[in-house]
Image: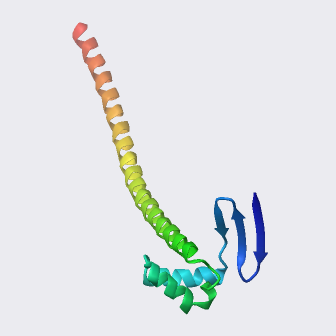
């Protein structure tokens, strides 16, 4: 069972049996981002204070603000990990390219040596 309510000021809220999904307005997100940069892990008391001090957040429950901060920390952690993995991938790609070039060079060298070996065998048999 799902109920949908919508308002331009409050954003879209979708209530489900097991919890709520809240879509924050751009203004709320901006305020939360600003607060996040000041303190990425606010205490329960600090979250209550934020709701009192920031009128744009007054219609959001403290638990939802707690969840927003948890999700934001998780997103930041995922972005950092993705960035780290991209850097590792670039290094591995460069190393792979060098190894493939070396492999090609060595295969040509082996082919040349096999040819020379075959040639010298023929010369010694004649």
- Which residue occupies the foreground of this view, 26 or 119? 26
Looking at the image, is 105 positioned above or below residue 97?
above
Question: Which image quadrant: the N terminus?
Answer: bottom right
Looking at the image, is 89 positioned above or below residue 29?
above
Across and down, in percent, residue 41 comes to 43, 76
Across and down, in percent, residue 39 comes to 43, 81
- Which residue occupies the foreground of this view, 22 or 109? 22
Point 45% across, 84% down: residue: 46
Looking at the image, is 110 positioned above or below residue 81?
above
Across and down, in percent, residue 87 comes to 40, 59
- Which residue occupies the foreground of this view, 126 or 34? 34
Using residue 45 as the reference point, say whether residue 59 is left or right of it. Answer: right
Point 46% across, 78% down: residue: 44
Using residue 99 as the reference point, say whether residue 58 is left or right of it. Answer: right
Question: Which image quadrant: the C terminus?
Answer: top left
* Residue furthest out toward the top: 126
């Amino acid at each position: 069972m799902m109920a949908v309510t919508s308002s331009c000021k409050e954003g879209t809220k979708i209530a489900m049996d097991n919890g709520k999904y809240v879509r924050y307005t751009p203004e709320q997100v901006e305020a939360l981002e600003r607060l996040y940069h000041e303190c990425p892990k606010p205490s329960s008391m600090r979250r209550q204070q934020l709701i009192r001090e920031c009128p744009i957040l007054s219609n959001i429950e403290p638990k939802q603000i707690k969840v927003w901060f948890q999700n934001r920390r998780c997103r930041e952690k995922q972005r950092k990990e993705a960035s780290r993995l991209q850097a590792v991938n670039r290094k591995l790609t460069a190393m792979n390219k060098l190894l493939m070039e070396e492999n090609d060079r060595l295969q040509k060298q082996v082919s040349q040596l096999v040819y020379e070996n075959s040639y010298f065998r023929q010369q010694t048999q004649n």
